[in-house]
Image (cartoon, rainbow, N blue to C red):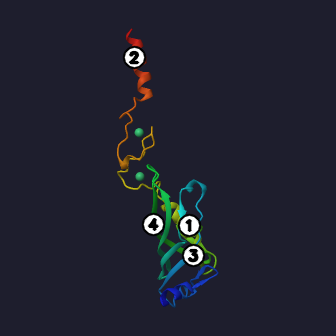
Amino acid sequence: MALQNDKINLFDNGKLDLRPLIAGDIKEQHFICPFIHFKPDSHLSDIEPTQDVQMEGKITNTAGYIKLEAVVSLHYRTSCARCAEPLERTLEVPVEKDIALRSQLQDDDTDDYIVIDTPMIDLEPIAIEELYLGMPMRDLCSDDCRGLCPKCGKNLNEGTCSCPEREPDPRLAILSKWSDKNKQ
Ligand SMILES: [Zn+2]
Ligand SMILES: [Zn+2]
């Protein structure tokens, strides 16, 4: 655990100090950035974090190219999108980003970089953005979840219900009426 504490102590006001790395004193800086609070947007109302987000990885300096490689992880509770059974999930999003100091950028083409104004980097907004990008469209209890019966609401993973197997599609019913009429 001593190692982990060292990593945490690298942070100053939540920002990781990159000065030794940028100065070339060290070639890589490992870090664990814990305690990132994640409050999902309303469109993710079904996602309930059970722990703070953690970001763990390293920042390297290879001949002046500074690169962030990390994994952002989130533990959360949600429910199956088909059968509504409660689920616990862990999302792990790999992150790879180039970092550049604004003063060292040659041109205005900053799209490919995380641009920082000082040699301190705030990892929290990066972690949050990557979580949103990596969030699954929906969670299922299993890929072949059979969902709920649309008529009686029974969880069809637990057995079949006595509802008729298949309702006629109302659109087809209209179509067949129409074609009957045209036959007359
Ligand atoms: Zn399910
Ligand atoms: Zn049913």
Which sits earlier in the primary sequence, circle 2 or circle 1? 1
Q: Which residue is mark 3?
A: 35
Q: Are marks 4 and 3 in contact (CB under 8 Å)?
A: no
Across and down, in percent, residue 7 comes to 52, 85
Location of residue 183 with respect to 104 vertically, above or below: above
Residue position for label 1: 128
Asked which secondary structure carries label 4, the reply is: strand
Residue located 54% across and 56% down the image: 46
Q: Callout 2, which amino acid?
A: Ser
Image quarter where the C terminus lies is top left
Residue at horizontal 54%, vertical 77%?
34
Residue annotated with mark 2: 179
Q: Nearer the viewer, mark 2 or mark 4?
A: 4
- Which badge, 2 or 3, is on the more N-terminal residue? 3
Chain-order first, disc 1 or disc 4: 4
For marks 4 and 3, the one nearer the N-term is 3
Front one among 2 and 20: 2
The amino acid type, in three-letter code, at marker 4 is Thr
List x then y, in percent, for residue 131: 52, 64
Amino acid carrying mark 3 in the image: Phe
Seen at 39% across and 14% down, the residue is 180
